Image: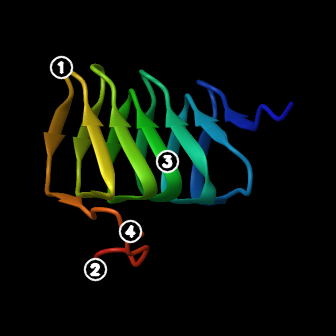
């Protein structure tokens, strides 16, 4: 059983994060996050200043950046996002805060090129 990588609440990463396994972020990341083909989970209380590309993105924390998912983006009630979302499916829980644009890509794969 694969659990994936975990960036703990006391960890600060400045730079690019790349993984080919699921990743959970509970700390702070500044840079880019590329987890193509896998799920990225941003835990409640985390601070992320990064563009994120993944198969799926689950957000419970605070993000400033562009989110691009191949499959789905889920915003939990504690999520606060300042940036644009692109995915075929987007779920937003009551209480989530989003300042940005949402592009529902339909049944086609999301364009993984980051907005400039």
CA neighbours of label 1 inside 10 A, class few (<14), some (14 to 19), many (20+):
few
Cα gap from disc 3 to disc 4, whole angstroms: 11 Å
Residue in the picture at 46% in, 44% down: 57
Look at the numbered disc 2 and give the secondary structure of its residue: loop
Marks 1 and 2, how far apart at CA: 30 Å
What's the distance in space between the residues labelled 1 and 4, CA to CA? 25 Å
**Could you tell me which residue is drawn at 86 percent across and 30 percent down?**
1
Q: Real-space Cα distance between discs 3 and 2?
A: 21 Å
- Residue under label 2, please give it: 116
**Residue to which mark 1 is pinned:** 94
| Image quadrant assignment for residue 92 | top left
**Label 3 with label 4: CB-CB less than 8 Å:** no
Pointer 4 local density, CA inside 10 Å: few below 14, some 14–19, many at least 20? many
Name the element at disc 4: loop
Q: Earlier in the sequence, mark 1 or mark 2?
A: 1
Residue 110 tag number: 4
Helix, strand or loop at disc 3?
strand
Question: Which numbered disc, 3 or 2, marks the residue that appears first in the sequence?
Answer: 3
């Amino acid at each position: 059983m694969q659990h994936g990588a975990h960036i703990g609440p006391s960890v600060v990463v400045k730079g690019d994060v790349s993984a080919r396994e699921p990743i959970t972020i509970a700390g702070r990341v500044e840079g880019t996050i590329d987890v193509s083909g896998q799920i990225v989970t941003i835990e409640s209380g985390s601070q992320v200043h990064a563009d994120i590309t993944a198969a799926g993105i689950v957000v419970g924390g605070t993000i400033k950046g562009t989110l691009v998912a191949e499959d789905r983006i889920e915003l939990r009630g504690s999520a606060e996002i300042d940036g644009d979302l692109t995915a075929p499916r987007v779920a937003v829980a009551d209480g989530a805060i989003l300042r940005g644009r949402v592009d529902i890509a339909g049944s086609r794969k999301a364009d993984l090129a980051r907005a400039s």
